[in-house]
Amino acid sequence: MLNNSPYVRKPASVSRVMLKVLAALVPAIAVYVWQFGPAILIQLALASATALVCEAAMLKLRGKPLALYLSDLSAIVTAWLIALAFPPLAPWWLVVTGTAFAIVVAKHLYGGLGQNTFNPAMVAYCVMIVAFPSLMSQWPGDLSMQAAALAEHAQVFPDGPAMVLDAITSATPLDALRTGLRAAGATVSSVSADPASFGQVAGRGWEWIALAYLAGGLFLIQQRVITWHIPASFIAALSVIAGAFWLADSTHYASPLFHLAAGGSMLGAFFIFTDPVSACTTPRGKLIYAAAAALLVYLIRVFGAYPDGVAFATLLMNILVPLIDMKTQPPVFGHKN
Amino acid sequence: MNSYNYRDIFWNGFWRQNTGLAQLLGLCPILAVSTSVVNGVSLAIATIVVMAMSNAVVSALRNLIPYEIRIPVFILIIAALVTVLDLAMNAWLHELYMVLGIFVPLITTNCIVLARVEAYAAKNPALPSAVDGAAMGVGLMLVLAVLGGMRELIGTGQLFAGIEMIIPGAHAVQVLPADYPGFLFAILPPGAFIALACLIAGKSWLEARNKAAQTSTGAGCVPAAH
């Protein structure tokens, strides 16, 4: 029931907003641990520690108050997004270097929180995947496969941990599908027939994590941390584009459901494209921004050479944000457009 | 004739109006060739030679060149000199020439060469012009050497890779541990932009610090004679 105005509004502080974003990520992290083991927790700790150290150092260099900016938790959000986007079994320095790059270059050299043109977490991802493509593409199989691979590995190579990583990692479903389709006569159903790695929809484990991101994202919308525009437009556009390709040739293009559940689609839709600093701010602008991002995501992941397109799509769309915002200014109240 | 302060001309080209850090001219070769110290410095040496010679030649001919068609004439002179250098490098430093590739002939189109010819050599006598061209080239070499060093060190953990193309028997120096994975990003184009931006920021910071030191001691900076 609505009461009459005037309403008292709680001021939305940065740290409150960031705390809600972190809370919304917790279910996904829990599912991640359940599906792929606790390695992600170490990556989260590493990324958070690096982010805080780099943030403190940059604040000190720039002569800003430490306590005020460190407690706004924005560095921790960046760190968590990086840890979740990176492969959990990657060497420790990968996530540390990526986080340091995100905080020092992408955030503070561009002017700090509120000034960064590009999403820092996605800058870190892009830098690292361009610099270390093979390390950034090694994702873990699920826990039972890991155990089996380790046991087998121990029998074949009794001494020497060098090949353990290769034995327990595999390409993401997106990657596996794209490489699989290159073989003559391969179809989507033949490549993804193996439920051990492809699961029901979009990769064993991944589909559950995607659901957890969806739940966290709905919580953020309910809390009014983000608006519905970007996630809804992204999901709708990705479904339409993937659906069009799928209807035209379902032997060579995966279903829209696969694309929604695979890779970083859900993380992107609710947590990355919605970054309040680097995304569009006008309502119409948000719709255009997210739809164009969905097109880029689809093109990069299906026709490109990288495991997923969310990070590159984010950075490319970040460049267009000022233009989209300028062209979609809502009319001032009382004026005709 | 004696009014030219050669030290000032040199300092102007080497630091104050540095091509890479202050004028930001000729960025294409700076960004593309600075993947290693050897590549960067070799191209810089070639550019020094071209700039000194083209400045001297244009300056000597400046009263004969009709003003209206000076740009094509300048370009022809520069192109002729670059062709000589191009053939010479192909003959005597063939391996290096293969590495630098298109960037040696492209010195012709490097805007810093034409910029100095137009801005300085067309208005000044031959000797100061030659010094100006060489100084600008040395400034470029400074940037290319530092930038190439940064990118090579971060990207591969080595320094002076490819030195054997110039000094037979010399070897690259492994600075970082041999199992350093190599941060490929530094070698790729974005690494060049970020490293160059850091150098420009460093120069601005040094100058701001010097200015602050000068104003605090009360000694005014002597304006350059131009």
Image (tube, coloured by chain):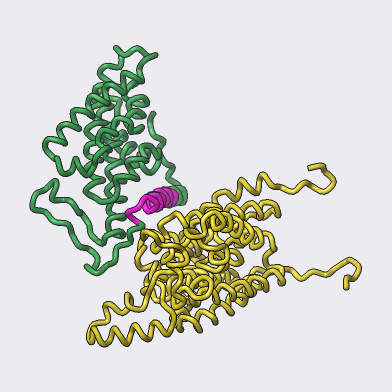
Chain colours: A yellow, B green
**Picture residue at 19% right of the left edge, 40% below the top:** B97
Report the quarter where the C terminus of chain A lies.
top right
B125 or B214, which lies in front?
B125
Q: Quadrant of residue B159?
A: bottom left
Q: Residue B80 location, x and y as percent?
A: 23, 24
| Helix, strand or loop for the magenta stretch, by majority | helix
- Left or right: A96 with respect to B61? right
**Picture residue at 26% right of the left edge, 62% below the top:** B157
Bounds of the magenta segment: B186-210
Q: Is residue B202 visible?
A: no
Q: Is residue A67 above or below residue A188?
A: below
**Picture residue at 23% right of the left edge, 45% below the top:** B41
- Left or right: A68 with respect to B86? right
Q: Is residue B28 above or below residue A256?
A: above
A324 or B166, which lies in front?
A324
Q: Residue A248 location, x and y as percent?
A: 54, 54
Q: Residue A77 location, x and y as percent?
A: 55, 71
Q: Residue B2 location, x and y as percent?
A: 26, 24
- Left or right: A331 with respect to B201? right
B50 or B33, which lies in front?
B33
**Picture residue at 48% right of the left edge, 60% below the top:** A251
* A171 magenta-colored: no
| Residue farthest along the left direction in this orientation | B169
Report the quarter where the N terminus of chain A lies.
bottom right
Q: Quadrant of residue B54?
A: top left
